[in-house]
Amino acid sequence: MQASGERRAGWGHRTLMVVLLVYLFLPLLATFIYAFAKDWQATILPERWTLEWFGEMFTDVRFMDALWKSLYLCLISVALSLVVMLPAVFIITVYLPGLESFMKGVVVLPYAVPGVVAAVGLIRAYSSGPINISGTAFILIGAYFVIILPYMYQGIRNSLLTVSAVELLGAAEMLGASRMKAFITVILPNIWPGVMTSTLLSFSVLFGEFVLTNMLVGGHIQTIQVYLMRRMNESGHLASAIAISYFLFILVLSMVLMQLGKKVNKGMSK
Amino acid sequence: MKPYLRLEGIRKQFGANTVLNQVNLEIREGELVTLLGPSGCGKSTLLRCIAGLTEMDGGHIWLDNQSIAELPPRSREIGMVFQSYALFPNLTVSENIEYGMRMRKASKEARRQRSTELLELIDLVDKRDAYPQQLSGGQQQRVALARSLAVRPKVLLLDEPLSALDAKIRKNLRSEIREIQKKFNMTTIFVTHDQEEALTLSDRVCLMNQGNIVQQGAPEELYSAPRTEFVARFMGSYNVLSRAEALRLFGTVKGEAESFAIRPEALALLDQEREGTGLESGKQIVQGTVHSASILGNVIRYAVDTAGLRLTVDQLNDGRSLRMEENHPVKLVLDATQLLHLEKEGA
C-alpha cells in the first residue's frame, strides 16, 4: 500500500514539474521559432525558415553597441555593490548586530518606491545643484546600486548566518589569525557560493531592468533594453531574434560566472 | 601554590543586564575546572571574556604571571572548543588541525607531523582528508579538540562541547576529554549546564548563578555540602525545607538557619506492613504515603507525602526491594544528623 502510495506521489510530482517546465518554456520556444520564421501565419509551424533576422541584428552596429553598454554598466554596478556591500554587511552582521533592524528597513526601500517615482525623484535631485549627473552613466550606476541593494544585502547576510560567521571568526582568531586573515581564509571561501548567487541574481535583474533605465538615460545612452524596445516596433521577428540572443547571452554569462566562482572558491580554500 | 590563571573582579553588562558581577577565580596549572550553572548565569560569557572574544567592562586576567586582558584573542595563547564545533567547512580535517600552525608560519613538515600525532590521539587518521560535513557530531568535536590542542595553548576552554551530542557519545567523549587533559596536564575550563557532567569530569566545580560564582569546591564537596538553597536544588534532588517545615518533620532542629536541606538518599523507606528493624540513635520514624515512584536505573525515586510535605526519597534498586505502589502507606526513617543548614541566598 505504502509503496503504491509513494509511486503515485512520484507521478504527481513529475506531472507538476512537466506542467511547470512547459509553462515556462513554451513562450521561449515560440519566441525561438518566431526568430527563425520567414512566414508563419495559418500553420502550426512556420512555412519557411530564415536566418535573416539574426543577420540583420548582428550587422546592426547599434545592437552590439547597446549590448556592450548594458554589459559594462551592469558589471560596474554589480562590482561596486560587491566591493561596498561585502565588507559592510560583514561588519554589521558580526560587529554591529544592533544596526541590523535599521539596515533591514533601508534595503527594502527600493521595493517600496515604484520605478517611475524613483526615476522622476532621481532626475529632479541630480539635474542641478552640486551633483549634476542627470542623463549620464553615473546616475544609472547609482540607481542600479540601489536597485540591487536588497538582493546583495540579504544574500550576503544569509550566507554569513548560514555558516555561523561569528563562531568561525572566533575560532580562527583563537587559532592565531588576525581579523583580516580570518575573513580571507575562513569567512570568504565559505560565503562565496552564496555571494556569487546574489551577484548573478543582481546582474540578471539589472540586465532586464527597463523602466528606470529608459527614464534616466533613455535619450542619452542606448542600453540593450532601450534598443530592444525601439526595434520591437519595427518587426516582431527581429525582436524575437534579439530576445533569444539576449537570453542565450545571459545563460552563457551565468554559466561562465558560476564556473569562475567555483574556481575562485577552490583557489581561496588552498 | 601560585595560581596559573587568575581572574579578578571580572565585570560585564549587556545594557542594563549585569551578566558578570565581579567574578574572581584562581586556577592551578593542570587543573580542570568546571563552570556550572543554568542558562543565562554568565558562564559562557566568562569563558568568552577569558578568550578575549567578548570585551570585559572591568577586571583583570593573568595567565602565567602575564596580564592578558588587553591582548587580542590571537595573542593570548588560549585554545577554545565551541559548542557548535566551528570547524572550517572549506578545509579538510588535517587542514583544520593545521590551521593554527599555518597562522604561526610553522613549516609544512612540522604541521604534518603534529596533525598526524593529534589524529592518532583522537583516532581519526583515516579521516585526514575528509571535510567536516562528512563526519559525525562526535568526530567533529574530536577534530575541534585536536585543532585547539595543535597550537599547544596554555589554557584550553571548552564551551558546552558535548551538549549537541547524544547521551552515549557524550559519555565516551567526556572520558576521552578527561584522559587527553590529564595526558597533556592541560589547564582546562569546561562550561556545562549538566551537573552530572561537572561532577564526573572536574577537579573543581564552580557553580554560577546570576553572574556570580555562588560556591566552588571539589565535586564531592559541592554535592554533599551545598551552602545555599540554589546550590542544593541545582546539585541534586535535595529536599529543601523551611525552618517551620523542618520543625514539623523533626520536632526540633539545631542552629538558627532559616532553611535546611536533606538528600533523597539520606531518607529511608520501610514498608508499613512489615516490621521495622531496630532504630539507631538519632533516627526517628514518621508515617507517610507514596505519591509516585519512578525507576531511574539503579535507583527508585519516590515522592512521599508526610507532615503536609512532599519529599523525594531515593532507594537503591537492588532487586530485593519491591517497588511500592501509589498511595501505599510507608514509614519514613529520618536522620537528623543528615539535615544540612543552608545560608541565605547571596550571604
Image (spheres, coloured by chain):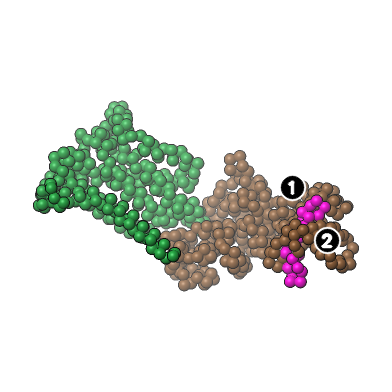
Q: Specify the farthest residue to the front.
A: A1
Relative horizontal placement of residue A239, taking residue A129 as reference (left or right): left
Residue in view at x 27 percent, y 55 percent? A256
Distance from disc 2 to disc 1, alpha carbons, whole Å, reads 33 Å
The residue to which callout 1 is attached is: B345
* Secondary structure under the numbered disc 1 in the rendered image: loop
Is there any visible trace of residue A136 in the rendered image? no
Is residue B320 a member of the stretch shown in magenta?
Answer: yes
Residue in view at x 37 percent, y 45 percent? A151
The residue to which callout 2 is attached is: B331
Q: Amino acid at mark 2?
A: Lys
Give the chain coloured brown: B
Image hue for chain A: green
Q: Main secondary structure of the magenta part?
A: strand
**Residue range of the region highlighted in magenta in the rendering:** B300-323
Which of label 2 and label 1 is nearer to you? Answer: 2
- Tell me if label 2 and label 1 are in contact, CB under 8 Å: no
Looking at this view, is B281 or B276 the one in front?
A: B276
Q: Amino acid at mark 1?
A: Glu
